[in-house]
């Protein structure tokens, strides 16, 4: 089965590992951070025996109190952080060094401020050696899909927060050699309305693309609106407490997700588990 | 009904267009007013200074030490007309330019190599800072001792004035690169060279350009100082010789010549800066 992106490109099909192999997997992952404190070095366990399997083509959300290490898991999938113990795998192969087969969308838009919208969207293709005219065509198709036609020659500081976020998402999606997208609270800094619009746009770009998305958030409604499954983390040291299926059919209407059949049940079920973590958790940052 | 609606919409559009024109016009005239005020104040202060100088000369202070604006203008005109300013300026300019190019290129290349070498930055930076803190003027006699009294010692001293600032600024620029940008591009599969070219260099560019800019007058200072110590050519020599003979007007005339050179250099660097840093929001340069 092939999938077609907004620019008519075919998205790389799943690799030969077979549909049964998880796209991403964490096996018995521990992470210990060593920080320099007043009394010398201090070791803190951030993750405790995390086991997680990400299925091909699913939208999986990691949710949990701040400081629970959910972003650390994402950074391990991106190959930016190595586990202290345990293994992180991509298509069944341990990740060593930066995982360049994943796309990475951060909370800060991290656009290159010296490049225009078009230049930012093209950078991944440029690094992969895609021809100039093809790069341009594909970038423009994606920009059109998120309503950024007419802003292609603007620099990031000339765009609104929502527009910058669109550029940062589209620049990851435009690289069709990437079939796993890692998103670390991408909509965190946005206002409530822009958030909803962008959630809707993300779902439209993702649905039918066959891509796998791992999404980190601490917003339960956002998690339910977007995900197929939600992995709930405990407070620090983080471990996965529960993984829930979201039974709401697709395509979804993020603007009226509260009215969707089954929303209240899944919300209450997950919230009960989350609240327990919020009240027992000592204050942590990030 | 439909026509009436269309008519109303057209009227509204015309009204709004007029509003936009008016707002644009107002913004423009405001901007002009501000510029006019600033320039008039600058001219007024300059005139006041010249007037105070003229007034003090011969009344409050000895004309021998102070000269006066009119004599300076006459002296400037004289050295301009008889070609002696240009004769000396030529040497000073060549020394400044060569010193600048030498100092800036070694500073840039040195900083990049130090950055790329593992452990280079923590080892070298304190040493460079120490050398930077040493008064370069104290090196001038050594330069003469080592390189004679020709063009070379001036070039080398000018280069030392430039090197450290460019080196340290470039290092600071490379250190200030947002690691988030680097990570995003790494995950996209950029090679170390790709990261350097596409993230490190453009990101550090404002620092590098600032370093290249503030060292333009520094190179001139280096050349002039070396000329003061020992030379028989150059504007530094011209000023020094005039001062030895108490020809204060000629000293000031030489300084005025240097002033024009610095203004010209600054304008040149500004043009470069604007073309390189078009992406940056409202960069405000203290020297611009």
Image (cartoon, rainbow, N blue to C red):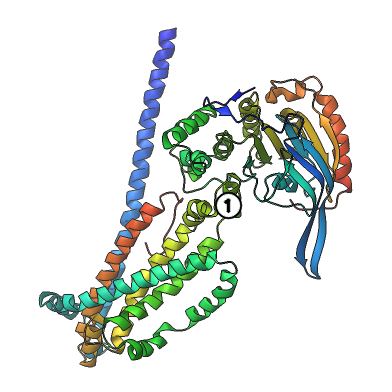
Going 56% across and 70% down the picture, which residue do you hit?
B120
Seen from the viewer's position, the closer of residues B270 and A40 is A40
Q: Position of residue B145 (x, y in %)?
A: 34, 91
Q: Residue furthest top?
A: B1
Q: Is residue B257 left or right of residue B164?
A: left
Q: Is residue B118 left or right of residue A242?
A: left
Residue B86: x and y in percent read: 17, 75
> Helix, strand, or loop for circle 1?
helix
Return the residue found at the far left.
B82
In the rendered image, residue A145, in percent from the top left (x then y), is placed at: 53, 27
Seen at 55% across and 48% down, the residue is: B190
* Whether residue B235 can be seen here: yes
Which quadrant would the N terminus of chain A be assigned to in this image?
Answer: top right
Which chain does the numbered disc 1 sit on? B
**Image height check: is A195 above or below B242?**
above
Q: Nearer the viewer, residue A118 or A179?
A: A179
Any part of residue B51 in sight: no
Name the image quarter holding residue A187. top right
Q: Is residue B275 above or below residue A271?
A: below
Q: Quick one: B51 or A212, which is closer to the camera?
A: A212
Q: How many marks?
A: 1
Identify which residue is drawn at 83% across, 42% down: A51
Q: Residue at x 57, y 69 (%)?
A: B121
Residue B241, position in %: x, y? 22, 89
User: Does residue A19 appear to the left or right of B150 in the view shown?
Assistant: right
Q: Residues within 10 Å of mark 1 (few under 14, many from 20)?
A: many
Rendered position, A157 above or below B179: above
A24 left or right of A149 in image? right
Residue holding disc 1: B182
């Amino acid at each position: 089965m092939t999938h077609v992106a907004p620019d008519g490109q075919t998205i790389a099909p799943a690799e030969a590992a077979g549909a049964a192999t998880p796209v991403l997997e964490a096996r018995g992952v521990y992470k210990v951070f060593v920080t320099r404190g007043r009394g010398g070095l201090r070791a803190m366990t951030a993750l405790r025996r995390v086991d997680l399997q990400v299925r091909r083509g699913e939208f999986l959300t990691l949710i949990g109190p701040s400081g629970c290490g959910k972003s650390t898991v994402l950074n391990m999938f991106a190959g930016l952080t190595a586990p202290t113990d345990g293994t992180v795998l991509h298509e069944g192969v341990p990740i060593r060094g930066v995982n360049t087969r994943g796309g990475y969308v951060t909370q800060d838009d991290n656009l290159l401020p010296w490049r225009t919208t078009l230049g930012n969207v093209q950078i991944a293709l440029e690094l992969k050696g895609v021809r100039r005219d093809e790069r341009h065509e594909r970038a423009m198709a994606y920009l059109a899909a998120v309503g950024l036609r007419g802003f292609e020659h603007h620099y990031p500081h000339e765009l609104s927060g929502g527009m910058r976020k669109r550029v940062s998402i589209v620049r990851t999606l435009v690289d069709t050699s990437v079939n796993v997208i890692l998103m670390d609270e991408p909509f965190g800094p946005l206002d409530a309305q822009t958030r909803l619009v962008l959630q809707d746009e993300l779902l439209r770009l993702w649905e039918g693309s066959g891509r796998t998305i791992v999404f980190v958030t601490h917003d339960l409604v956002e998690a339910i609106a977007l995900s197929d499954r939600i992995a709930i983390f405990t407070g620090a040291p983080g471990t996965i407490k529960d993984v829930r299926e979201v039974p709401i059919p697709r395509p979804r209407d993020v603007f009226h997700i509260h009215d969707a059949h089954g929303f209240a049940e899944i919300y209450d079920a997950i919230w009960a588990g989350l609240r327990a973590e919020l009240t027992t958790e000592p204050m942590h940052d990030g | 009904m439909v026509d009436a609606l269309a008519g109303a919409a057209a009227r509204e559009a015309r009204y709004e267009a007029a509003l936009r024109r008016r707002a644009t016009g107002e913004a423009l005239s405001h901007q002009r007013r501000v510029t006019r005020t600033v320039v008039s104040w600058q001219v007024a202060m300059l005139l006041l200074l010249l007037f105070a100088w003229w007034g003090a000369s011969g009344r409050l202070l000895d004309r021998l030490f102070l000269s006066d604006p009119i004599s300076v203008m006459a002296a400037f005109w004289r050295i301009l007309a008889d070609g002696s300013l240009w004769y000396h300026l030529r040497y000073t300019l060549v020394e400044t330019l060569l010193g600048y190019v030498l100092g800036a290129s070694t500073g840039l290349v040195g900083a990049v190599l130090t950055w790329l070498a593992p452990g280079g930055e923590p080892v070298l930076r304190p040493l460079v800072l120490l050398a930077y803190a040493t008064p370069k003027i104290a090196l001038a006699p050594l330069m003469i001792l080592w390189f004679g009294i020709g063009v070379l010692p001036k070039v080398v001293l000018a280069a030392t004035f430039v090197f450290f600032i460019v080196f340290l600024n470039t290092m600071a620029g490379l250190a200030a690169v947002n690691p988030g940008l680097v990570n995003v591009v790494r995950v996209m599969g950029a090679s170390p060279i790709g990261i350097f070219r596409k993230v490190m260099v453009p990101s550090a560019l404002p620092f590098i350009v600032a370093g290249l800019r503030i060292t333009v007058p520094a190179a001139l200072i280096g050349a002039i100082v070396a000329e003061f110590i020992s030379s028989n050519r150059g504007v530094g020599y011209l000023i020094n010789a005039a001062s030895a003979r108490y020809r204060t007007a000629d000293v000031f005339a030489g300084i005025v010549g240097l002033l024009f050179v610095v203004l010209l250099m600054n304008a040149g660097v500004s043009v470069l800066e604007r073309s390189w840093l078009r992406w940056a929001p409202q960069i405000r340069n203290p020297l611009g």
